[in-house]
């Protein structure tokens, strides 16, 4: 088994409280499935810096304020990931499909009906229970 892969993921809300999810592009592990935007933390990089970098690279937005929400580990048949979920409280710009991925805004109550990666499923349950979007 490879070493643990540390990944940051973002819960980004629009003005009506919907959450942004991204489809994994062709050629990537588990392509065609949906996930929360984010990506791998580089060696020596903080989670917050990785989150800001990934959101800029993938979505073209500037993360202005985010807070950690929860973390978990998930083992796939071929790898193990440690996921750190962050709630993005404020950002500048409009999310765009810069990484070959499709994007979709989904009401929190409907996230469970999406084909979201197993590792992200606990985040779905937690987001549905948040008192209200930031």
Image: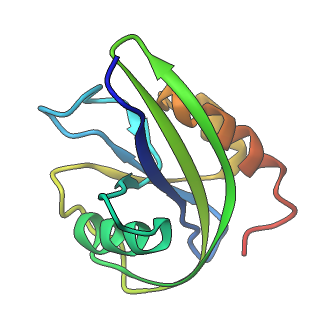
Residue appearing at x 45%, y 34% in the figure:
81
Furthest residue to the left?
27
Q: How is the image coloured?
A: rainbow
Residue 75 in the image, given as x and y percentages of width and height: 49, 20
| Residue 5 appears left or right of 30 | right
Q: Nearer the viewer, residue 78 or 105?
A: 78
Looking at this view, is 46 or 92 the one in front? Answer: 46
126 shown above or below 49: above
Relative to 32, residue 38 above or below: below
Q: Nearer the viewer, residue 14 or 27?
A: 27
- Front residue of 20/73: it is 73
Provide residue 14's location: percent of width, then percent of height: 56, 72
How many numbered dots are placed on residues in this image? 0
How far from the left and from the top, in percent, is residue 126? 76, 45
What residue is drawn where x is 59% and y is 54%? 85
Q: Position of residue 15 (x, y in %)?
A: 61, 77
Residue found farthest to the right: 131
**Image check: 96 left or right of 38?**
left
Q: Residue drawn 49% across and 32% down?
A: 116
Tell me the quarter of the image containing the N terminus: top left
Q: Would you place residue 115 above or below residue 87 in this image?
A: above
- Residue 124 in which image quadrant: top right
Q: Quadrant of the C terminus?
A: bottom right
- Residue depicted at 47% across the width and 49% down the height: 36
Using residue 119 as the reference point, say whether residue 29 is left or right of it: left
């Amino acid at each position: 088994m490879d070493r643990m892969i540390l990944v940051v993921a973002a819960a980004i809300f629009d003005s009506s409280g919907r959450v942004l999810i991204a489809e994994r592009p062709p050629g990537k592990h588990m392509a065609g499935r949906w996930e929360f935007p984010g990506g791998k933390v580089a060696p020596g990089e903080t989670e917050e810096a990785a989150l800001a970098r990934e959101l800029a690279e993938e979505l073209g937005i500037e993360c202005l304020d985010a807070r950690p929400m929860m973390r978990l580990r998930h083992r796939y048949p071929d790898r193990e990931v440690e996921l750190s979920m962050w709630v993005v409280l404020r950002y500048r710009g409009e999310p765009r499909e810069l990484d070959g991925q499709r994007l979709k805004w989904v009401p929190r109550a409907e996230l469970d009906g999406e084909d979201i990666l197993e590792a992200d499923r606990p985040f779905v349950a937690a987001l549905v229970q948040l008192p209200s979007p930031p």
